[in-house]
Amino acid sequence: MLAASLSLIIVSGVILYWIQPHRRAWAGWLSALPPLAVTVWQLATALPFLNGDAGTASSAKAALPNGAILVEQYRWIESLGLELSFRLDGLSLLFGLIISGVGAAVALYTHYYLENDGRQGYFYLSLFAFMGSMLGLVWADNLLTLFVFWEGTSVTSYLLIGYSHQSAVARGGARNAFIVTAGGGLALIAGMILLGQQSGTYTISEIVARPGLTDLDLYPAILILILLGAFSKSAQFPFHWWLPGAMAAPTPASAYLHSATMVKAGIYLLARLHPALSGHPMWLWALLIFGGTTMLVGAITAVRHWDMKALLAYATVSQLGILTTLLAFRSEAALLAVVVGILAHALYKGPLFLVAGIVDHATGVRDLRKLAGLRSSLPVTSAAALLATLSMAGIPPLFGFVSKEALLESFFESGEHGEIAGWIAFGAATLAGTFFVTYSLTLLWEAFLRPGSTGEAEGSTRESSGHIVQTRVHHAPAAPFVAAPLLLAATGTAAPFALQPLDAFLTSAAASIAGAPVHKHAALWHGFTPVLLTSLLAIAAGVWLFQKRYYLRRALALLPENLRGVVLFQNFLDGIYALGQFTARFSQGYTLATQAAIVLLAAFVPVAVALLQIAPGDLLTPSGVLPGAPETVLILMTVVSAYVTVRIRTSLGAIVSLGVVGVSVTLFYVFFSAPDLALTQLLIEVLTVVLLVLVFTKLPPDIRPPMQKLKQIRNVLVALAAGAFGFFLVLFNTSEAMQAAKSISGYFLHNAVPKGNGTNVVNVILVDFRAFDTMGEITVLALAALGGYALLNAPRVNLPSWTSQRPESESTESRQNPTAAETEQSSTESPAKAGEK
Amino acid sequence: MPELYLRFLNRILTPVLLLLSLYLLLRGHNLPGGGFIAGLMAAAAFQLQILSRGHERVRRTIGPYLNSGIGLGLAVAICAGAVGLLDGIFFKGVWFSLNLPVLGYLKIGTPVIFDLGVFLVVVSVATSYLLGLSRVSDAAALLRQDTDAPVRSDSPASVMPDANVEPSHRAEP
């Protein structure tokens, strides 16, 4: 059923693309159905297990170890030991429900957000492909399966972020996000392979159940590689900057990918491998330091941004940092806080993004400096925003408060147990919590609550923009458009009062992270504890900072621009481009003769090195047979015609004598009975000579100019090196040592008929034994043809200088310009063409 | 009028060359021949066509098929390799025998089909170059007729492979 659900999601994406959803009013509802069905199915499957020991459930539960609800396996690439295996347990259920549940809301929302957009179908296609990858990622029970879906989310998110492909900002954001996450993916696959090899299995549930992985010698390498993957995906410091850049995505994608799902993939991975990898000091400190930094950097910089989406993005970064910090610890309280935090975040940040999208859609503005009084113009939307924002601020009794209490308490608990890390995390989280309150209130007040009139004291005195006018709504949102965030926000609001029924669900997820049953329970009210006091203090401090936010913003604006991650990364990319250009210019920016010289010398160097290491006596042929009469004649013919080619002063003459060289070589093949080679060489000679003659007869008769002395010497040296390369290579091959070594030709000769069903060994090698090589060759040939096609059919590339020197033939010039450009190509390209063939 | 000979030769030789190329392709697995050689042979046939009838007419007849020929050849080659996947490994040779009424007993394997793909790629690539180059050289000839008198000394031909030469070399004896 898991695989069937995945297929359902992906197929419905294709169907949605196909029905052209922008033309169908009902497409929004239709699109919400598949994710909704998956949500309902997951609930239905999981409920009997979550409700405990009743009848059939317990017997089935006994059959599946480690709290798995459902296990599925499919054969995939057996020769590589790859299989598609899926497993549903508490943690995957939590993520699966968020992905499909929020997915349903986002799918509905998308139809209204992208109304009248002809590419809506494309968006749905990418969105559902992403949803499928994400579900596959959290359901996978094999490291490699997980990795495939992991990369799937990277690619699909690239498509989603770059949806507005005509905007440079969107393209840049998509590119940065992709480079960072896919680069992290490379580290991740290396870490996964190390982990799989070291633990002897790629099945996650088996790895997790295996003790002692932290004692491995390679543990630090595994940890660093996997953390690189997880941190880059989950936008942890120092990779956090890609997430705000990804806000160029359409809002549904931001809401879905960059708050509820994709950025949680790294968190999911850390949680999934938590039983196997945690417990080592390295794990604790790495997660604590990077998570803590991320949480503070995100929380503090969020205040400085005017764009609603940027503010939310940094808030998300901060929340991700909190989750990472929590995962550093092993206590039940911390793991439960992770689960509550993930759920709460999805239920407040998702709707907030959606609200930002509605505001953008309805007013065309996302800038907090220009927004005001949405409370009266978009009342329902503002209600959803109010619920979600207060939850984000952690105001009791909302879900965000439960989450914050849980996390502060878990840090406090660790601290009380004498862990210094616990106190550090507690302090950082309190500070971050203060800023949470500040930016939540800023968002809420500036966009929604402050009256949109000129009398707004703070706004008019502090801001240079002057009066803040009530934002005009020119495009009232449709009811289902608003319903999506409202539903999510309402769920988030109701959750704290339904902790009793939710409990089984939350603890089973926490148990999957812990790898053992969890007895801790989330609660709305913990009593008057130091934690509650801290929490209230943080809220008070946050409110105070909110009132002083203009000072705060001004202080943050003083931070140097070019220390920002995006700028640094852009510099890095520019460096890579510059390096590429330098390399290209260094290796390819010459005339044909120079480039050929480089290639030939590069071939000669290894032979020269080998020559220095070998005694001259070893290279002499064992038999010492001198060439007979026919060979001697051929040798003379080759040498003489080669000399003529070099010395002759006309192009046509050179072409013809070059042909003679080729034919002489062909005759060598004939004498040494290599008919296939001979045929090929002969045909190539014929084609080349005819081709060159074809080109050069049409050109004016031309006498080659005498070459510069220096160049002549260089060419002679290169020619000698190339000749030495061929000569000594043959000698190496015929030397006794090489003959004594095991040659592969025997294998081909013996197996051509029994295994290859052919008596022409050359051909059998080409199309059977070495078919992969041939495949590569014809691919290169095809690419060369494309390049040649482009060059030969280009209307004009560079006009040669002589075309502009003739003012008297203006008319003919303009008519003939394209051909003039081609002429230059023909004369410079043709030898290259001949060489390629 | 050299084209007269060529046209006459063309009439006779083109079909012969094409048939020969097909023959080389089919027998390639057991006797000298194969996709590369057959492809070059067919390209030689088209070369003859270009020489005798001009590249314009040849382009009109076979030009449209060249680029798709390259793609088709690659596709055939990959498909031939993919058949082996059914047996477990990419590019594993799979052989089956046919008993045809006229040709008799015929043994066909995926390597032979692969060779067909090679043939298609080679013939398309080579012919595409031949057409492109002959078009360019014709254009050059046209240009030369147009601009013969005034710019004798630095005509396009001065842009030789050895390109960094001063255009004034004609002044030297």
Image (tube, coloured by chain):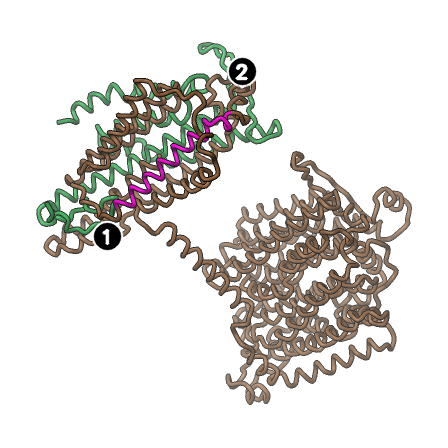
Chain colours: A brown, B green
Q: Which residue is the site of mark 1?
A: A799
Amino acid under disc 2: Ser
Query: Mark 1 against mark 2, which lies toward the viewer?
Result: 1
Mark 2 crowd level (few <14, some 14–19, many ≥20, 10 Å Cα): few
x 33%, y 18%: residue? A628
Horizontal side, residue A107 vs residue A176: left or right: right
The percent coordinates of residue A83 (x first, y second) are 69, 39
Residue A639 located within the stretch drawn in magenta = no
Mark 1 crowd level (few <14, some 14–19, many ≥20, 10 Å Cα): some
Amino acid under disc 1: Leu
Chain to which the residue tagged by mark 2 belongs: B
Mark 2: secondary structure: strand
Q: Which residue is the site of mark 2?
A: B97
Dominant secondary structure of the magenta stretch?
helix
Which quadrant of the view contains residue A387?
bottom right
Residue A718 located within the stretch drawn in magenta = yes
Report the span colored magenta. A712-739
A369 or A573, nearer to the observer: A573
Looking at the rendered structure, whether the residues under marks 1 and 2 are on a common chain is answered as no
Mark 1: secondary structure: loop
The percent coordinates of residue A474 (x first, y second) are 52, 71
Quarter in which the C terminus of chain A is drawn: top left
The percent coordinates of residue A652 (x first, y second) are 19, 35
Rendered view: A486 above or below A830? below
Mark 1 near mark 2, Cβ–Cβ under 8 Å?
no
Rendered view: A204 above or below A295? above
A731 or B1, nearer to the observer: A731
B103 or A736, nearer to the observer: A736
Quarter in which the N terminus of chain A is drawn: top right
A170 or A834, nearer to the observer: A834
Chain to which the residue tagged by mark 1 belongs: A
The percent coordinates of residue A755 (x first, y second) are 56, 20
